[in-house]
Image: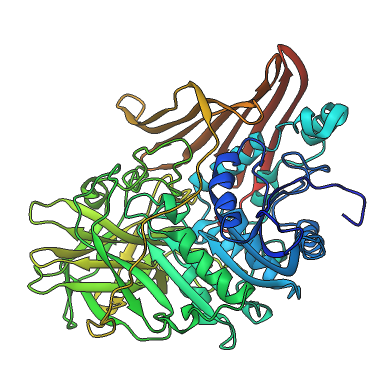
Amino acid sequence: MPDGCRLSAKLWLPVGAHQAPVPAILEYIPYRKSDGTANRDQVVHHYFAGHGYAGVRVDMRGTGDSEGVQLDEYLPLEQQDGQDVITWIASQPWCTGAVGMMGISWGGIAALQAATYRHPALKAIVPVCASDDRFYDDGSYFLGCLSGQTIGWGAVMFGRNARPPDPAIVGDTWRKQWLNRLSEPPLFLETWLRHQRRDAYWLQGTVRGHYEKIECPVYAVTGWADCWPNTVLRLLNHLPASVPKKGTIGPWGHAYPHHGMPKPAIGFLQEALRWWDRWLKGVNNGIDHEPQLNAYIQEKVPPDAGHTVRAGQWVHQATAPTAKRRGQHWFLGDKQLRTQGFKSAPVIIHSPLSCGLCSGEYMPWYTSGYSPQLPMDQREDDAKSVTFDSEIRDQPLTLLGGAVAHLSLTPSTPSGLIIARLCDVWPDGASTLITFGIANLAQRNGREHPLPVEPGTRYEVQVRLNDTGYTIAPGHRLRLALATNNWPMAWPTPDDGALTLDSENSSLELPILDPCASDTQPTFAPPEHAPPIPTDVLREPDHERVITRDIVEGETALWLKKDSGRQRLSHNQIESEESTTERYLVKDHDPLSARAEYTAHQVIARDTWETRTVSSLSVSCNYTHLILEAELTAYEGEEEVFSRSWNTEIPRDGL
């Protein structure tokens, strides 16, 4: 880099690239190319190299085998490093000067950010499962509330950033670099918690609101089960008309679609190649003249946190559904959803704090094998909510886009949340979650400036639910469930208050898919990828997900264990393991009892060399503050080489 910091890269080059240069595909992330994502990188970039592209995988500054220290997510320096990496790639003798950029999650966000700089060598991007808004659905403020489960991401990065570089690559400086990584970075989560509104901190690096800065072609991809299902439609709706754009939304969680779960997976790498061929090689293959959106319309499936296949069908849309398009309004009252307005009495909404435990994982993320992370049967949460059901359907009702609940609410206390869920109710009463949304009453007019909540004052609140594609089948009912809690997806506000719903002046706006809007179905080839690196499994992965209730203490706990086991990569003999636990505790009707606890155990080793980091982090609260405690200890062999702890209180700001 211009400041002298060296970033580490791995290259996959087609045979003869030095004599006949090729375009390059960059993936730029902090997740350690030598071990953390080594197999994922291999199956993707070796595949691209086999089809005439240079694959380039770069560790961000301060991560993996790169020098420096990572001080936070998405900093301007990180983005500028990305621009310098693109310049370097484009200038290499094996590159034509044309660069594409792709990635999932952080890598997809990095690709979107890079596109806003308009580097002349960056010809196209493919962001997958990415966020375009750092506050709204990234970091810790999922949907505008403080999320107990996204706090866990801060805990994960706390442990992951403490891992050392590989001595076989960086040499004798590895220990000094490691100690710098341990001692210099702040606690990311503390920084995030000190910015509880959508301020300049979050706007830096946020693409939303700056779509006009992107000029290169964008192919955005996500899954309905992912934590960020809204980005694709927002990009298709808001990127400049002059920008070639395309989107695909499948049934998947947080994974590349060639490994997509729940299935069906698709030939994503072939699809990406078509995009690269069009915009990096100039091949007129017609992809830019195809319908703009491929969407998987999910069909009825019994609720199951571990289902591996999602029934449904693909549809084409010439253009993406837009939020400006008026949806079909349904009206609420007497526990009913109707397409015509009618007289109805006010309803009290007051959910116990344990409501929400059936929601599943914030980010279904199958990094160490498939495990039950999807929503469970919603009947338990429905019983803790106020519900409104449609009549039994005699015709299918298909949704595509984002529903909006328009609610007239009067709070009993000076803080509160409102959660809206759409469910597919089966003839036997089973309830399958379709989508959900959360609104903080203090952020009812925007997330930049929280407003006071006056008890007894009526407020008109809009709850925008996550985008979805779903068909409610004949014989089923559509349910709107309204609750005041969704633990641990949403951290409770300090008051255990009720909301009075003026149902007569409330409605549900549904994004109905016109049956005539798609007369053809997209077809995807079966998944292809390069062979993975041979890997020895030294210890099998293990997963646990347990809900317990302490009747004496009145406390409910959700316990999660995610243990990747221990693996050894054959090409470099690196052994690695990662084991994390999460525990979410709350007492019904005591919002100040909410507590989230995280631990992580990380090992990087080779032969007789072994490093280990152990981290713990917890968040609790009182009426005015969030309480953050953390500890990090590092070992080389059995010797403790570093230890550090944090204990701080952070004022609540409208949360």
Residue 440 appearing in the image? no
Q: Which image quadrant: the C terminus? A: bottom right
At x 35% / y 70%, what residue is drawn?
A: 295
Question: Which quadrant of the structure image shows residue 28?
Answer: bottom right
**Left or right, residue 480 beside residue 96:** left
Where's the N terminus, which quadrant? Answer: bottom right
Q: Nearer the viewer, residue 609 or 223?
A: 609
Residue 309 is situated, as x and y percent measured from the top left of the image, at 27, 50
Vertical arrangement, residue 649 with respect to residue 91, above or below:
above
* Residue at 41% in and 80% down: 320
The figure's colour scheme reads rainbow
Q: Based on the displayed image, in which of its 4 quarters is residue 402 positioned?
A: bottom left
The number of numbered discs placed on residues in the rendered structure image is: 0
Q: Nearer the viewer, residue 443 or 409?
A: 443
Q: Quick check: can you spot residue 207?
A: yes
Residue 548, image x and y in percent? 33, 29
Question: Relative to 102, is 407 above or below?
Answer: below
Does residue 310 sit above or below 317 in this rendering?
above
Viewed as shown, does residue 315 lie left or right of 492? left
| Name of the residue lying farthest toward the top | 638
Q: Position of residue 449 (x, y in %)?
A: 62, 69
Return the x and y of residue 461 as percentages of the image width and height: 41, 72
Q: Is residue 185 left or right of residue 302?
A: right
